[in-house]
Amino acid sequence: MDMDITWPIEIEQYERKIYDLKQLIEISKGLNSTLDYNTLIESILLTCMGQMQLLKAGIFLKRGIASDHFVLHRNYKGFDIDHSQEYEFSYEDSMTGLMESFSRCYTMPELKKHGFESPALEVLHRLDPCLVVPLVGKGHMNGIIILGERINQGGFSEVEKEYLLNIASLASIAIHNASLYEMATTDMMTKLKIHHYFHSAMEEEFERTVRFNRPLSLIMADIDHFKQFNDTYGHSAGDHVLKVVANLLKENIRPMDIAARYGGEEFAIILPKTDMTEALIVAERIRQNISAEIIRYEDKHLNVTISMGLTQVDIDSDKSKKDVITRADKALYMSKNSGRNTVSFM
């Protein structure tokens, strides 16, 4: 009689495990389908929120693969952030050491009962998550996921915590791979994409534009009189200027846009789904912000300007990305020849 009762329960448990494994396989496929860092982080957070029916989710990751600090990634969902405070802590923190040694899901009361003085615990306390999940892959901690309350206001069962650990393990490996790819495709000085990546991305965007008949614009930009600037103030000052200009470029474009270091002091910006009129607004905003920026280097206050050329893909006449790049480059030289610190288009 007992077997008649327990057998259906055992079948139900096995069916649940099979379903969870299938879900994890699909999650793994999804996480490994992209090497774009920000897209991956978005996917991890949305996966956790969808699987557990959560209202909040966030993730702490290293600033770079060689960094020793974890920082709250900007893609957090739902948490109330005090922007006057820093949300970061050291990899050497005692709380981090605990999580790396004993990889499991933790509630805040569980972490607090260990009694250690921990800056990391203080950071988490300000966010007040319901569950903290370490991102451990291959025995190494790559960050932590913080999860807020559930839609049904319920807690997390042990089975669900184990499931979240499995997701975190898959996410940790995917993040590590994406970090390596990010390093390989990023200019270390400016943190913009490298020349080779630009050409690869431009090829892909050009093909999408032709296939879906949607706009695509390209900006080519060059810092004015940069050689003269280097000769006057030195190469260290020039390197600092490159970093400031690159940062201003990133601040004035969308996450979907691609900014690259095209040459020494020359940059390229791919603007998907953007027509000429919209691209002109972007280019002019960048030009004005760079012109107005006071660059502080040692005891000097410096100013630089930038010349820009832009164009939009013409599906009827452009045969390849090369046609678009050549035309944007010609527009850039129009700006150079007409006095610099201006935007031209063709």
Image: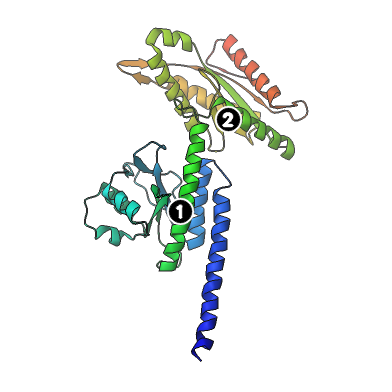
- C-alpha gap between disc 1 and disc 2: 29 Å
Q: Report x, y in % for residue 154.
A: 41, 68
The image quarter in which residue 301 lies: top left
Observer able to see residue 100: yes
Identity of the residue drawn at 52% across and 27% down: 285
Q: Name the residue under label 1.
A: 169
Look at the image and name its color scheme: rainbow
The residue under label 1 is which amino acid type? Ser
* Above/below status of 196 relative to 233: below
Side (left or right) of 319 relative to 340: right
Q: Which mark is residue 197?
A: 2
Residue depth check, mark 1 versus mark 2: number of the one nearer the observer: 1
The residue lying toward the viewer, choosing from 93 and 287, is: 93
* Above/below status of 172 relative to 216: below
> Quadrant where the C terminus lies?
top right
Observer able to see residue 157: no
The residue under label 2 is which amino acid type? Tyr
**Upstream in the sequence, badge 1 or badge 2?**
1
Q: Report x, y in % for residue 121.
A: 28, 51
Identity of the residue drawn at 58% across and 57% down: 26
